[in-house]
Image: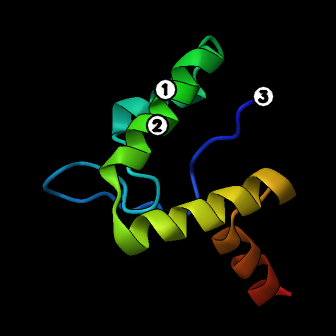
Amino acid sequence: MIVSPCISICKSDPVTGFCYGCARNLKEKLTWKDKNTSDDWKLKNLIEIRSRMKGWQLESFEKSYNYKRLHGVSLEKKRKIEYND
């Protein structure tokens, strides 16, 4: 199973339509949620969204996405859970 690139920073740029957190557009987000979407498409999309990011955005994404892959939640989601405890 390939983990969704959503890192819980869901705000889209009004000009590009790309999410500030994961750099996906709305169509890509919907495709990820479709149970029929192949792992091959998801892997290609991960490469594509990374190519849209630079500098701190890419560093932040990689750190949070890797954490999510290991622990099941993004760093932002972890922060929100800890804040509510």
- Tag 2 near tag 1, CB within 8 Å: yes
Q: Residue at x 77, y 51 (%)?
A: 69
Which is closer to the viewer, label 1 or label 3? 1
For the residues labelled 2 and 1, the Cα–Cα distance comes to 5 Å
| Residue 79 visible in the picture | yes
**Among the two numbered marks 2 and 3 on one chain, the one whose residue lies closer to the N terminus:** 3
- Numbered label tally: 3
Image position, residue 75 (x, y; %):
69, 71
Question: Percent x, y for residue 71?
Answer: 85, 59
Residue at image mark 1? 44
Q: Is residue 29 visible?
A: no
Q: Is residue 20 left or right of residue 1?
A: left
The residue at which mark 2 appears reads as 47
- Specify few, some or many for label 1: CA neighbours under 10 Å numbering under 14, 14-19, or 20 or more: few
Give the distance between the C-alpha atoms of the residues marked 1 and 3, in whole angstroms.
Answer: 14 Å
Q: Are marks 1 and 3 in contact (CB under 8 Å)?
A: no
